[in-house]
Amino acid sequence: PLMSAAAPLTASGAGASVLATGGRAPLPVAASLNGSTIHTIDYDDTHMAVVAHFGASVVAAALAAAEMRQASGADLVVAVAAGFEMGARVGRAVMPDHYQRWHSTASLGGIAAAAATSRVLGLDPLRTEIAVGFAADDTGGTRYCIKEGDITKSLHAGNAAWKGTMAALLAESGAAGPTGFLEHELGFVWAYTDERPFDRLEQIATEAAADTSWEIARADIKAHPCILSSHTAIEGALRITRRHDLRLDDIEAVILHQPAYSDRHGLNYRPTSAMAARLSVPYCVVAAIRDGRVGLDQFAGDRFADPATRSHMDKVTIAPDPSLATAYPGSAPTRVEIRTTGGSRHTEEVGHARGSHERPLDADEFAEKQRELLGRRLHSAEIDRWLDLTGRLEGLPAVDELCALLRTNPPHAPERSAT
């Protein structure tokens, strides 16, 4: 009876839009494919307090559900906010030791996606709790993908969206599921943190009830399509090299003083794929100095495998500095030190990355980022339409036109190309 009730909700038919294919798929499938696609180029968002990229799973799940249920733009906005709220609040209960083993985008993303989908579906508190319990009981995702640059990093976001949407659909269908699972003596907190602080989740819930701010407001929007811990390093290195007119051959060593995020975080000196290069702090910093920027083009082809580039990557080291975490809580700061072949030494400290919630992108910068991304798929008039629709998202009676743009799959390259 359980699967019979849920099957019509997941069966093929009109379905939800699948990005850039022109096609549609059942709700959980579309959410999964879109979540993986969103996270593939590492150009999304990061909630640094729990080191999770919630947008990929939450937006993919909420958007697919909103399209299927003809929900409004305002419904979509509220659902996305709810997903971030649930994922981040639960994440705070298990951090920081949680991140030493688990990729939070996977382990917390399904919980967040379940909350977001439940909001679109209009589930009551009990059904929402059951949906979150289903998702939390079926989580996972180790940090192997961070170290090796494996495609499972993208799949983590997609799988989280799948689990969240399926969990909400099952709960809506009347399925009996786990309640109180997050704080249960053998539940999520017990399984996914070494400290096992069973009372912390209740404390966070109490604090949340009195908190007038939203967790989504603490999310950082990436200014570069790569690992967030490289962003302040990129900015610091560019400030130094521009100020002193330095080239790669002028540099003897680059020392990046950073908080210790986890063992060998971002220290891949021989990336073998574009994904691995995005997660390599040495490559990102060298690419920034080499090209004067880090955008999509820096990961095109196999530029990361260039022998000269790799020789310069060997000059980059990361030195853990716990004081930076204290000085810039909830951020990914770097104090960049560059030593030149001529014997000079230059330092630059960047506490908050451009695009972080402490230094948000302005409207023009955010629009330019969207144009860089959409310009590889849409014509300029379509991009203008996208910016118009998203600019007044909360007033849209439905999300159909927005989804149609995302689904666009032109037979030829658009006239706008990224630079």
Image (spheres, rainbow, N blue to C red):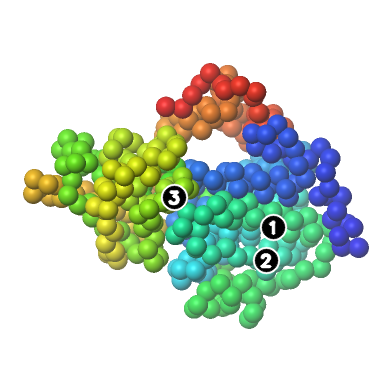
Residue name at image x 81 percent, y 50 percent: 10
Residue 351 in view, yes or no = no
Residue name at image x 46 percent, y 47 percent: 273
Q: Nearer the viewer, residue 80 or 22?
A: 22
Residue beneath disc 2: 138
Q: Position of residue 9 (x, y in %)?
A: 83, 49
Q: Disc 1 vs disc 3: Cβ atoms closer than 8 Å?
A: no
Residue 307 figure quarter: top left
Frontmost of labels 1 and 3 is 3
Residue beneath disc 3: 272
Q: CA distance from mark 2 to mark 1?
A: 8 Å
Q: Position of residue 115 (x, y in %)?
A: 67, 56
Look at the image and tell me in which quarter the N terminus lies.
bottom right
Q: Position of residue 411 (x, y in %)?
A: 65, 23
Q: CA distance from mark 1 to mark 3?
A: 30 Å
Q: How many marks?
A: 3
* Amino acid, disc 1: Lys
Residue 274 in view, yes or no = yes
Circle 1 SS class? helix
Residue beneath disc 1: 163
Frontmost of labels 3 and 2 is 3
First along the sequence among labels 3 and 2: 2
First along the sequence among labels 1 and 3: 1
Residue 44, labelled with which disc? none
Q: Is residue 111 left or right of residue 150?
A: right
Q: Disc 2 vs disc 1: Cβ atoms closer than 8 Å?
A: yes
Q: Position of residue 383 (x, y in %)?
A: 56, 25
First along the sequence among labels 2 and 1: 2
Q: Nearer the viewer, residue 413 or 363?
A: 413
Q: Is residue 100 above or below residue 381?
A: below
